[in-house]
Image (cartoon, grey):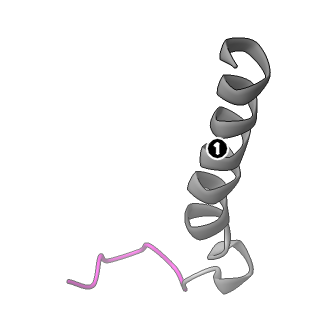
Amino acid sequence: LPIKGKGGSDWGYSWVPVVGPIIGAVLAALTYTIFWH
């Protein structure tokens, strides 16, 4: 749904919700491996 007065989509930022969880998962796996194995 278009929101009045919202402005255009900032596609330069669109990678953040994609890459963010991937980086978080990798860091969590590394942390688990380092500290609990």
Task: Tell me: residue 17, above or below residue 21.
Answer: below
Residue 9 appears in which quarter of the rendering?
A: bottom right
Across and down, in percent, residue 24 comes to 64, 44
**Prevailing secondary structure of the magenta residues:** loop
Position of 6 with respect to 10 (left or right) is left
Judging depth in this view, the residue of 36 and 8 nearest the camera is 36
Task: State the residue in front, 1 or 37.
Answer: 37
**Hey, which residue is sitting farthest right in the picture?**
34
Q: Does the magenta stretch include residue 5?
A: yes
Q: Which residue lies furthest to the top in this view?
A: 35
Instruction: Give, as a three-letter code, the residue at label 1.
Output: Gly
Quarter of the figure that contains the N terminus? bottom left
Q: Which residue is drawn at 44% across and 73% down?
A: 6
Horizontal arrangement in the rendering, residue 14 relative to residue 1 (left or right): right
Residue ranking furthest to the left = 1
Judge whether 33 appears above or below 14 on screen. Answer: above
Residue drawn at x 66%, y 14% as measured from the top left: 36
Q: Mark 1 sits on what residue?
A: 24
Q: In this view, does 1 lie to the left or right of 29?
A: left
- At numbered mark 1, what does the secondary structure look like: helix, strand or loop? helix
Q: Where is residue 33 in the image (x, y as percent from the top left)?
A: 71, 28
Please identify the quarter of the rendering in which residue 17 is found: bottom right
* Residue range highlighted in magenta: 1-8
Q: In this view, does 25 lie above or below 6?
A: above
**Residue 15: where, in percent of width, then height?**
67, 74
